[in-house]
């Protein structure tokens, strides 16, 4: 009887682990650019759309709390460079207050099938992200392809190299 109880506990733990591991999958990248915020103003309705798209890339992938703070600062700086100082400040406040990890399609780590909070992305997760971005519709689109390429080169590849190097050390 004791052996059966142990087997049931072990089976339950294995099933729980498998369900947990399966729920930590990265979905293909999707962007709505500036979510509920305009993508520009006046005569330039896409004035800072590229800034929002790049910010979405960071939010889709997720990572540490510091990485989120840095992504939000980059959004503010990018929008400010378009000449929209007030909009950059308001957008920054919005993403700092509203972009907390969660289940919303604009939350930090929204690309994952389960809320990861501020969990670091593993080398395997980064490799999956790279594959998904390289094959994404956004990497085929003339307007967004350079933004995807910049994210892959400037953000994803260095993170992946760092993760692979640290796993070799361990």
Image (tube, grey):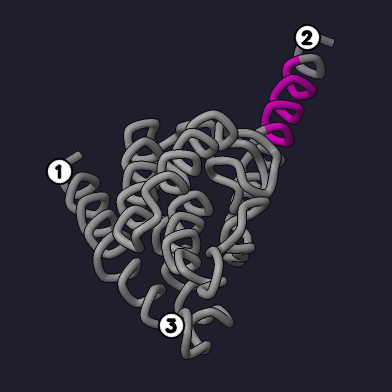
Labels 1 and 2: the sequence-earlier one: 2
Quickly name the residue at label 1: 169
Q: Nearer the viewer, mark 3 or mark 1?
A: 3
Say which of 6 and 24 sits in front.
Answer: 24
Say what secondary structure mark 3 lies in: helix
Q: Provide the secondary structure element on which disc 2 rests.
A: helix
Mark positioned earlier in the residue sequence (3 or 2): 2
What is the residue that sits farthest to the right in this orientation? 1
CB under 8 Å between discs 3 and 2: no
Does the magenta segment cover residue 3? no
Query: Is the stretch drawn in magenta largely helix, strand or loop?
Result: helix
**Numbered badge on residue 2:** 2
- The image shows residue 135 at horizontal and vertical percentages of 52, 81
Percent x, y of residue 18: 67, 41
Residue 130 in the figure: left or right of residue 113: left
Kindly state the secondary structure of the residue where label 1 is placed: helix
Magenta-drawn segment: 6-16
């Amino acid at each position: 009887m004791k052996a059966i109880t142990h087997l049931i506990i072990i089976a339950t733990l294995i099933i729980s682990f498998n369900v947990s591991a399966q729920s930590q999958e990265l979905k293909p990248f999707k962007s709505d650019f500036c979510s509920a915020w305009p993508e520009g103003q006046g005569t330039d309705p896409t004035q800072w759309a590229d800034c929002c798209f790049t910010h979405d890339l960071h939010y889709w992938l997720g990572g540490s709390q510091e990485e989120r703070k840095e992504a939000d600062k980059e959004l503010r700086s990018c929008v400010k460079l378009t000449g929209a100082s007030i909009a950059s400040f308001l957008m920054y406040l919005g993403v700092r207050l509203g972009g907390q990890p969660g289940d919303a399609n604009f939350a930090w780590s929204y690309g994952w099938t389960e809320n990861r909070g501020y969990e670091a992305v593993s080398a395997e997760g980064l490799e999956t992200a790279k594959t998904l971005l390289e094959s994404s519709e956004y990497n085929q689109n003339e307007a967004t392809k350079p933004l995807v390429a910049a994210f892959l080169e400037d953000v994803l590849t260095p993170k992946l190299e760092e993760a692979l190097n640290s796993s070799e050390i361990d």
